[in-house]
Image (cartoon, rainbow, N blue to C red):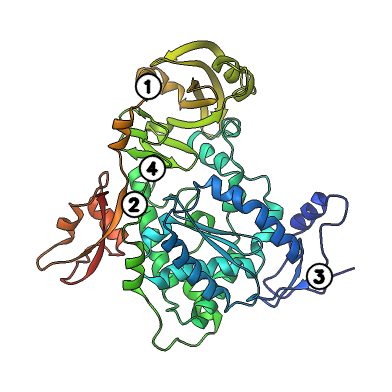
Amino acid sequence: MTCPPPKPGNRFPAAALALALALAPGAALLQGCATNPATGGTMLSFMSPDEESRLGSEEHPKLVKAFGGEVADPALRAYVQSVGTLLARTSELPELNFTFTVLDTDMVNAFALPGGYVYITRGILSLANTEAEMAGVLAHEIGHVTARHAAQRHSRSVLAGIGVGAVAILTGSRGLAELAGSGAGVHLASYSREHELEADTLGVRYLARAGFDTRAMASFLANLRAHSRLDARIQGLPPDKVDEANLLATHPRTVERVEHATAQAGVAPVADPVVGRDVYLAKIDGMIHGDSPEQGFARGRDFVHPRLRFRFRVPEGFRLRNMPDRVLARGPDGAAILFDGAKRPANRTPLDYLVNVWARSLRLGGPERITVNGLPGATATARVNTSDGARDVRLVVIQDGADRLWRFLFATPPALTGRLNQPLRETTYSFRRISAAEAARWRPVRIRLHRVGRGETVAALAGRMAVDGFAEEHFRVLNGLGAGEGVRAGQTVKLVLEDRR
């Protein structure tokens, strides 16, 4: 059976077809030819709609767990579901039962699974300033679902891993990355430019049909770019370097391309479009910003987990980055720290686990038992080759209770190893359990609304923000203000303030 020639813009690379055939378990994976209901193009169907729904339902709980769970606020969850459902009902698949989930992470991203599972992070909600901007993010993801991009990408990307990407950025080593890989990365693999254009075009179509301001998609993308540049500055990276898990990395788009998609969508301008600034800000007032207690807090050089009751401190010059299942820290000239946890296998000592489980693929030097503030542990070293040259690696395992292990991976360029040896050793031995009283003192920061008073300035308002440095830049990005743009009396703005409860 052969498919008719696809429409322009719907080509199928031979490599993708070969991979689909190679992955077919017994029966043919391909379902034959189909007309895409959203784009009108002819496509090879890697999965039937029922298979897409089954895959989505199977992967959904795994993905939610991998990204720290859902936000706790039922009203916020219901709000996002209601806006998403409105948009989905304007799509070419109104009968599909879409599920919209707000993930409890400050990671700035959104993505979708086959079968109508759409995810938006708390980090995205913090950056958006109107209901239309949030709707633009959701509409774009709905477009990926209706055009079946998520299903096609899943077929081609089952071996990807966000953990692999994150550690590879730090160390340039696939071998080290495999020590801390995570299966969630398939959902964050980047789309092609063609798929992004299609999703934007469809997203604009759904925004217009639902009565939203279609310009919101471009305005949010501009603010996202400002956020990414600030994030790069904070981490000491080049200005245009974005995190592997950032929306701009997984959805490579520019404002110009979004504007092109808006023109290509061919929709008439919406009369009196919905922007929804006030209602949106009211919905996110009080929402946790940054780290949540369930995932611990990265504050300055300290990482504290009040729920799991431990803390440690990284050396001066290292910047912490908290993620749902690990903590990363970048240091000078390519030095890096990765911290995470693992379940202790039965009858394995920390040293046995380090040598024979965690680092069994590495040639280790000097494995030894250690004690860290009363907790049994083990350590060893290795030398690995990376894309950026050789790296010295020190691995540390600390046992906490009967079945929990904590793991440090320190990676340094050989020229820095001697100089950083003592500071990194101090990081290891800074790990300690904390009391319930100490844990209770650590609280999240939250988005709080503030009505600008007469005479108040950006600088004064930014000075109230509970952030680690770059206060004015954070305030501008959070409120979508350009460089040099001021505030006016009566305007509602977002602040980041310490938890009052």
Whole-angstrom CA distance, mark 1 to mark 2, is: 27 Å
Q: Which residue is mark 2?
A: 230
> Which quadrant would residue 364 be assigned to in this image?
top right
Q: Where residue 441 sits in the image (x, y, percent)?
A: 27, 37
Marks 2, 4: nearer the viewer: 4
Q: Which residue is mark 4?
A: 293
Q: Secondary structure at mark 3?
A: strand
Q: In the image, what residue occupies the spot 61% across and 17% down? A: 348
Q: Which residue is mark 3?
A: 33
Q: Which residue is mark 1?
A: 420
- In the rendered structure, which amino acid carries the disc numbered 3? Cys
> Which quadrant would residue 429 be assigned to in this image?
top left
Whole-angstrom CA distance, mark 2 to mark 3, is: 46 Å
Name the outermost residue toward the left: 455
Whole-angstrom CA distance, mark 2 to mark 4, is: 24 Å
Q: Where residue 463 sits in the image (x, y, percent)?
A: 17, 52
Instruction: Name the quadrant of the N terminus.
Output: bottom right
Indicate whether 63 appears above or below 9.
above
Q: In the image, what residue occupies the spot 55% across and 80% down? A: 265
2 or 3: tag closer to the N-terminus: 3
